Amino acid sequence: MKTALITGITGQDGSYLAELLLEKGYNVYGIMRRKSVVDYGNVEHIKEKINFIYADMTDPISLINAMKISQADEVYNLAAQSFVATSWEQPLATADIDGIGVTNILEAIRIVKPTARFYQASTSEMFGLVQEMPQTENTPFYPRSPYGVAKVYGHWITKNYRESYNMYACSGILFNHESERRGKEFVTRKITNAVARIKFGLQDCLELGNMDSKRDWGHSQDYVQAMWLMLQQENPDDYVIATNETRTVREFVEKAFYYADIEIEWSGTGIDEVGIDKGTGKTVVKVNPKFFRPAEVEVLLGNPQKAETVLGWRRQIDFNNLVKRMAENDLGLIKNSLNK
Ligand code: NAP
Ligand code: G4F
């Protein structure tokens, strides 16, 4: 039986990865931050099957301890301050957790069990102001937020430990991936949650920032498969995980309303643009400049060819299915909350 240690186990990806590894017969350890109220987040439903260790990415002692207790064969570093907008409000905490935190966990592995295999959650945000279309493993980075900058450090220190110490250390450069478990501050879940609330009369309007922004969106359940595959190869390497399709935020909005049987008609431009419910004539989408970012990543589009060829990875859930699953889930949650 293999043993895995997951940092960020309470988050979106951590929960799907924990489910996958449990299915494969792994002994799963997860690190958790101490909070005033105990909260298992997205792994509440499987908490009895997981061995939890209190630790924090900014505390190397706690990570050494986590390695000593778990003696993990595979370590998946998914912990991060992962919300780009917050990284301007908390640039140093973001750097500590998402940047230096990677060195902390790599050192813990090197000191306690250097043969453990390591996965680093790198991101398409490192491409930022994109230097070519589509982005591949060889596209130069140009991060556009404190989050992106911290992740570039995490990416390079992972590569550096691989080359310096011959450690089995990989980075997955994952493009946006969403799910029913996505935090409600991220645009996709913000949209599907608002669509459900509007449908059931709990909210009048959805306020968004830059709707022209384009993202390459996949489903988290598909993407955690790629993380696992990266640690099963003969040699460690870095891989882009993406769908090779890009859509605007506006397209996501239209599609989410569609699954709630609402057709959206757009009117106006720039900050005056509105989305109107064709059936009722009511304005259900508005622009609020408060959601604009100091610097924007306008477009992301990833080429997953290397992962498909070398790892045999294929995404199963396409854009329509992703939005459908998220919209139906939120419609169900809001409906149930009203019936209670
Ligand atoms: P998420 O839902 O925000 O989960 C983040 C996790 O990190 C949570 O479990 C959180 O714990 C934990 N965490 C935050 N700060 C920590 C600290 N100081 N010490 C220990 N744990 C800490 O993020 P996700 O969407 O699952 O993403 C997983 C990873 O992939 C992140 O590193 C993210 O940056 C990266 N990534 C995500 C995407 C995407 O589109 N989802 C794309 C590329 C890369 P709490 O529950 O205590 O807050
Ligand atoms: O959903 P978002 O907040 O995700 P973002 O910034 O692309 O970051 C996510 O994906 C990265 C991978 O590329 C991860 F590394 C990162 O951890 C995170 O998971 O925003 C998506 C786009 C942005 O262009 C944003 O400006 O949507 C635009 N947007 C427009 N209105 C909005 C809003 N974003 C949010 N969160 N809220 C809005 O009201």
Image: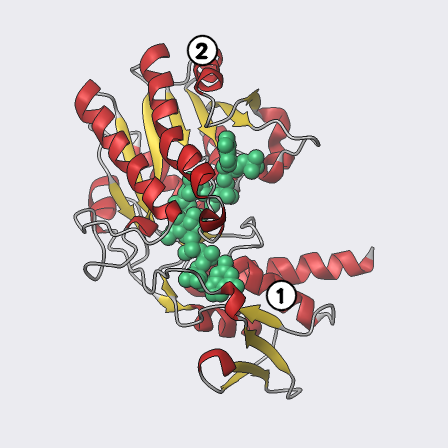
Q: Say few, some or many: other residues with alpha carbon within 10 Å of mark 2 (under 14 / 14 to 19 / 20 or more).
A: some
What scheme was used to colour the molecule? secondary structure
Nearest the viewer among 117 and 92 is 92
Q: Position of residue 59 (x, y in %)?
A: 47, 22
**Quarter in which the N terminus is drawn:** top left
Query: What label does residue 27 carry, if any?
Result: none
Nearest the viewer among 246 and 259 is 246
Q: Is mark 2 within 8 Å of ligand 1?
A: no
Give me the C-alpha separation between circle 1 and circle 2: 44 Å
Where 170 falls versus 334 (above or below)? above
Relative side of 78 to 114, left or right = right
Q: Position of residue 311 (x, y in %)?
A: 25, 40
Where 281 falls versus 236 (above or below)? below
Query: What label does residue 194 carry, if any?
Result: 1
Where 281 falls versus 24 (above or below)? below
Residue 232 visible in the shown view = yes
Q: Position of residue 197 (x, y in %)?
A: 68, 66
Q: Amino acid at mark 2?
A: Lys
Disc 2 target residue: 68
Q: Quadrant of ligand 2?
A: bottom left
Residue 323 visible in the shown view = no
Label 2 residue SS: helix
- Please give the name of the residue rendered at 20% of the width and 41% of the height, measured from the top-left corner: 310
Relative side of 287 to 218, left or right = right
